Structures are given as C-alpha cells and as structure tokens.
Amino acid sequence: MCGIVGYIGGKDACEILVQGLKQLEYRGYDSAGIALLVDNHIHVAKTPGKVSKLEEQLDDSLSANSGIGHTRWATHGEPNTVNAHPHIDCSGDIAIIHNGIIENYAALKTKLISMGHQFKSQTDTEVLAHLVEEFRSQGHSLDIAVRLALKEVDGTFGIVAMSASEPDVLVAARRGSPLVIGLGDSENLVASDASALVKHTREVIYLHDNEIAVLTKKNVSLKNLDDEIVLREAEHITFDVEQIEKGGFPHFMLKEIYEQPDTVLNAMRGRLLHDEGISKMGGLSEVEDKIVDARRFVITACGTSWHAALVGKHVIEQCARIPVEVDYASEFRYRNPILLRDDIVWTVSQSGETADTLAALREAKSKGASAFGIVNVVGSTIARESDAGVYIHAGPEIGVASTKAFTSQLVVLNLISLLVARRKGVLSLEQGREIVGEMLQLPDKLSRIFDNLDAIEEIADEFKDSRNFLYLGRGVNFPVALEGALKLKEISYIHAEGYPAAEMKHGPIALIDRDMPAAFIAMRDSTYDKILSNIQEVRARKGRVIAITNGADDRLRELAEFTIEIPRTIEILSPILSVVPLQLLAYFIAVKRGCNVDQPRNLAKSVTVE
Ligand code: G6P
C-alpha cells in the first residue's frame, strides 16, 4: 500500500516525482523519499511525514532527468528517516523502492551480512538493494541482477530500481503489488497507481505478477522472471486528473459522499431492463447459468466491503432465496473452508488489491470453486484473477474511509440478486419491475439527503466530544449500523460499536448512560415496531438517541432526541440511502475534532499486506 513512482526522460524528474507522490499519498503516508540521478550519482532525500515535508527539504538546484520516489506505510521498522525508502546498497550505486513484504528477509539479511554487506535500516526492503548489489558485483546488468535477486525472494513486491552506473534505465518488477507503466513521448514512467501518471500520459501497460520491465527514455520492454519476453499492448486510460482532485470540496471524503447520486447511477447504467423487470451485466453474461443454478453463495471481503457483503446476504436471501455465507477474507483463507460443487465465491473489493481478499479468491479457485469479483478499480489484480465479475464503476476513491464504493457495491449486489431471483422465477415480473423502478429513483433520493446537512451538522456539534458511540439496527439495517460505527472510528477516533439492536440487551446495554449516544437506523420496514422497543430500552436508561428514519411517526419523534429523515424506498434498497447520513455524521464530527479526514492515522486505502 505504499506509493511508488519512477521517471526517466528529459524533464525535471524531481518535480514530476514529487507531484506523482502527492497523488499517491492516500496509499500510505508515514514517510516519503526520493532518489535522483544527479551528475552520475544517486542523490537521496527522505523524511518521516508527508510529501510536503519532503518537498521543503529538496534542493531546488538539483537537476535530474531520472529518479524514483516513494510514500511509505510501515510494515517493518518504525516510520523514521532511515527506514524511509529509497534504500541504497553499500556502494551507493543502487537505489530501490518497494511496496509489499519480503517474507524471508531475515534469512537473506543474515546471509548478506556474513558476506560483508552493511545494513542501515530495519526494513525488509533493504535486503533487495544489497542482493541486487551482490549480483551486480558478479558483472550482471541491473535488470538481470534484479531478476536474479527476485528469484531468491519469498513474498510480495512492486519495486523500482535504479543504478548510477546504468544511468539510462529504470527496472520495475511486480509480484502481488500493483505497478503500471506510463508511456510518454521520449519519457516513460512507472507508478503503483495510474493516478500518478495521468498528468503525463494516458497510454499505460499494467505489469502482471512475476514480470519485470526495463524502462529507458525511449523504450519499455517486458520479460517474466524466467527471462522470457512478454508482449503486451498498451491500454488507454479514460479517467482524468480532475476526477481525482477534490473538485471544490474541502476533503475527498465529502466530495465522494456527494458523488453518490452519480456513482449509484453509474453502477446500474445500462444494466436494468425495466420491461422485463430484470438486470443484465456484461461481465456475468457467460456465467449466468452457473450463478442461477448455484446452491450457495459465499461472499468474502474486508472492511467496508465486508459490510456491503452482509447487506448483500440479506438482499439475496430475501429476494433470490439462495443461502449466502459472508466471511472475512482473512478468516476464510486460513480455515480451510468447505466449498461444495455449485458454490459460487464472490469477492468484494473497492481497490481490487486487498491482500486478504486476493488470497481468499485464490483459495476459492484452488479448491475448484467459481470465483467472481465485485470490484471498483479496473484492471486491478482481483479483477484480473476473477473468473468473471462486475465493476461497480464508482471512479477513483481517494478518501481512505470508503463511502461511494459502499453504495455502489450495494447496487451491484442488488443487481445480482434481481438477476437470480427473476431467472429462478422466485420473483414475479411485477415485483421485478417494482425493484427496477425503485432502483432508478435512488439517485434522486440520494440528492435529497443533502438537504438535511444543517441538521446533521447540529448533531455532530452536540456529540463531537463523546468518547463512545453505539450504532444499532435490525435486519438489513444491522450492517448499516456496523458501517456507521466504522466510519466514525476510522476518521474521528471515537470508539464506536455497531450492534444488532435486539442483541444490545445481552451486554452493551450496561454501557448506556447520558454519555453514550445511540444512533438507531429506524426504517419504516418489517423491523420498525421492534426497533421502537429497543429505542425505549435506551431511553429508559437515559441514553441519548439519534434516529435515522424514512418516516418518523409520533412514537419515534417522542423517543428520539434527534431525527434525520431520508426518502423512503423498499427495504432491500434502504441501506443505500440510510448509510449516507451516517457517513456525513462521521465526517462532520471528524472535521469538528480537527482530524485529518482523508488520511486518518494508521490507516491505508489499499491494504496489500496480510
Ligand atoms: C482498508 C480501507 C477500507 C476498506 C478495506 C477493504 O481497510 O481503509 O476503507 O474497506 O481496506 O478494501 P477493499 O479495497 O478491498 O474494498
């Protein structure tokens, strides 16, 4: 989840790298560093903290046309200057940046030390610099030395290496950590994410696992780690840099919350057939029969995507009457899961790069199951390795706390549910049409939620100093409670728990007093009367109640201190609306507490380590 960028060409490498790193900071940001080729020497600058701090330290007079830069999210060694990347070898000839984990680094380090290499950092990455140095000292060129070094490595990597004695090349390689090459005019770039490249080029080549690329100013060549030539056409990327800038909002998170009427529409665009009351998704067309005939779905995911999967379970079981199991990807992969023939494993991931989710996908495939993806980032590893899948088309999500991806994931899970339910005949044409009609109204209903902004900000003001928060819901609203609590803890650092409202009396009720606000997702659905009883239980203990509802009656108005009204829709779609006030509440509380909303401490957007 570190950010990587490399440049070789005729322009000011320093400026291009710093700009690229700023674009990548959301991937990890506890330290930053850069290596430039200046007068045939490697010049390194690095610092703990953010790229802006690195920028302050850079000498304006440095003139370089090639270099590499890195933003780090620490895995081995604390985030200080020494552990920041790039790492260099003993001679100072080689510089290397790395995203991933070298699992056998301790053994390699011991071996290299016994051979006379001197280490400066606690990182796993530094072994790569010395290993490459070792092969260089045997007379190999940089690309061959990198290839031979990587053959000795267990674990994951996206790396870029440069050498002062081979000033005309950069060498990049990947296994498990994404890298994309940008093809320019007499310049070439490489980055962990296309967002760092789009200012310079839209022609890109995605590196696959176990591939190595040699970049010169005029040329890019690819091989695999077995030294076989790889030929791959360049792809044209369509999103542009404005899309990934804040667009006038103070934070990416707020911008992304506001984008939801559009992103929800994009997720269903061209996929709903109103007359037939059904959905169609190009990415699933060839496997539709398999999906419809499945005996069971297993959905695996992490974080917010896992919450989306829990909503999906409810929706699919209610509508399509297929049993659904939801598992944390990290648990699924390690418990030797039982997969039956006719099971379908779905992986849900915004980034398409989450290590545990990817491993769960591979585990499912290795057991012979069909594994399908629900992914946002086009061309990501999970998207490529899935047997089939659906993109959610939410566009780049920069805020670390996921918002728009969640609602788009819910749309796609509903599309899948509708497809199966109608094809299986458990939903009538009439019912199918009703769902399609309701889905098409979602963008407009989402827009109307923003009319409540002042009321939500007022609640944020009231509770910004709370130390704990409870989020409660029943049925399909329970995962929404989990997601509301996750949003709050991620960005405001307030302890928050999501609980099934009826389960509260088996423990959390002991915590309730005037200092424990409880946010209820109290929709006018099959659970409404029950949730009113739960609210009463909280009120009886002097708890303060915030209710998110789509139709307050007098009973609710009397019980809740604060009420946020959202438009009404059918039960299975209501999480797409009810989560939005919770996203906004977390956002306003975090801003009022002075927290860094887009880059909360200790978190990363794309968690590519276990
Ligand atoms: C990280 C992010 C979360 C995200 C989770 C899963 O923890 O901070 O926002 O929900 O990873 O990521 P994915 O990209 O697989 O959906």
Image (spheres, rainbow, N blue to C red):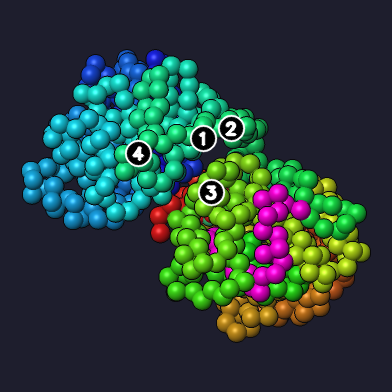
Q: Is mark 1 within 8 Å of ligand 1?
A: no
Give the residue type at disc 3: Arg
Task: Please provide percent x and percent y for residue 592.
Answer: 59, 48
Give the residue type at disc 2: Ile
Residue 404 appearing in the image: no
Q: Gap between marks 3 and 1, in whole Å?
A: 16 Å
Q: Is residue 138 left or right of residue 527?
A: left
Residue 228 shows which numbered tag? 4
* Element type where label 2 sits in the image: loop
Q: Nearer the viewer, residue 528 or 225?
A: 225
Q: Give the residue drawn at x 25%, y 31%.
A: 142
Find disc 3 in the rendering and name its residue. Answer: 384
The quarter holding residue 511 reads bottom right
Find disc 2 in the rendering and name its residue. Answer: 237
Give the residue type at disc 4: Glu
Q: Give the residue drawn at x 85%, y 74%.
A: 555
* Element type where label 3 sits in the image: helix
Q: Gap between marks 2 and 4, in whole Å?
A: 27 Å
The quarter holding residue 91 reads top left
Find disc 1 in the rendering and name its residue. Answer: 194
Q: Gap between marks 3 and 2, in whole Å?
A: 16 Å
The quarter holding residue 169 reads top left
Q: Nearer the viewer, residue 310 or 598?
A: 310
Mark 3 or 2 closer to N-term?
2
4 vs 3, front mark = 4
Q: Is residue 304 magenta?
A: yes
Q: Gap between marks 1 and 4, in whole Å?
A: 26 Å
Q: Which residues are the magenta region? A: 280-307
Mark 4 or 3 closer to N-term?
4
Report crowding for label 3: few under 14, some 14 to 19, many 20 or more residues within 10 A (C-alpha): some
Q: Give the residue drawn at x 50%, y 49%.
A: 381
Give the residue type at disc 1: Ala
